[in-house]
Image: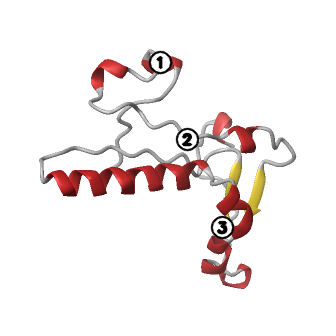
Amino acid sequence: MLVQIFHPGDASGDNDPMSWTEPYFKPDYSYWNNRSDTSWLSVDATEEKNHPLRDTQSANAATEQLRKFSESKSLFFLAVGFRKPHLPFRFPSKFLDLYPLDSVKLPDNPFAPANMPEVEL
């Protein structure tokens, strides 16, 4: 089961600082925010190493926090949020290797389910 714990920014009162022992980790996305050239981009390893994607930054920060928790040997709760899939679709190129195009099969039935709301089409 997936549960959204909280939503960063204005919706949570500027990241709800009184609810967290450690400050909310906010990835530096300035490089990617200035890239308005595409809403879908596979990012090669060199570019991502120089400018990590948001989810990579979050995963790295969570890994570091787990290291700290393991050293302290105390009980903890760690919530980590990932944004993908979400526009803009920017992801590490290595994931394309996991799903070669010739292995991707479209459904036999290309039609939307009956009674699907118009907004979903």
Task: Please tell me whether mark 1 sits on a helix, a strand or a loop.
Answer: loop
State the separation of the CA atoms marked 2 and 3.
Answer: 40 Å
Which image quarter holds the C terminus? top right
Q: Residue at x 77, y 58 (%)?
A: 41
Quadrant of the rendered image containing residue 102: bottom right
In the drawing, what numbered circle is on residue 27? 2
Quadrant of the rendered image containing residue 120: top right
Which percent across, then down, holds residue 87? 68, 44
Please indicate whether residue 8 sits to the left or right of residue 74 in the image: right
Q: Are marks 2 and 1 in contact (CB under 8 Å)?
A: no
Earlier residue among tags 1 and 3: 1
Above or below for 1 versus 4: below
State the separation of the CA atoms marked 1 and 3.
Answer: 44 Å
Above or below for 43 versus 7: below
Which percent across, then down, holds residue 31? 74, 43
Residue indicated by mark 1: 14
Quadrant of the rendered image containing residue 5: top left
The amino acid marked with disc number 1 is Asp
Of tags 1 and 3, the one toward the viewer is: 1
Residue indicated by mark 3: 109
Task: Please tell me whether mark 2 sits on a helix, a strand or a loop.
Answer: loop
Residue 108 showing in the rendered view: no
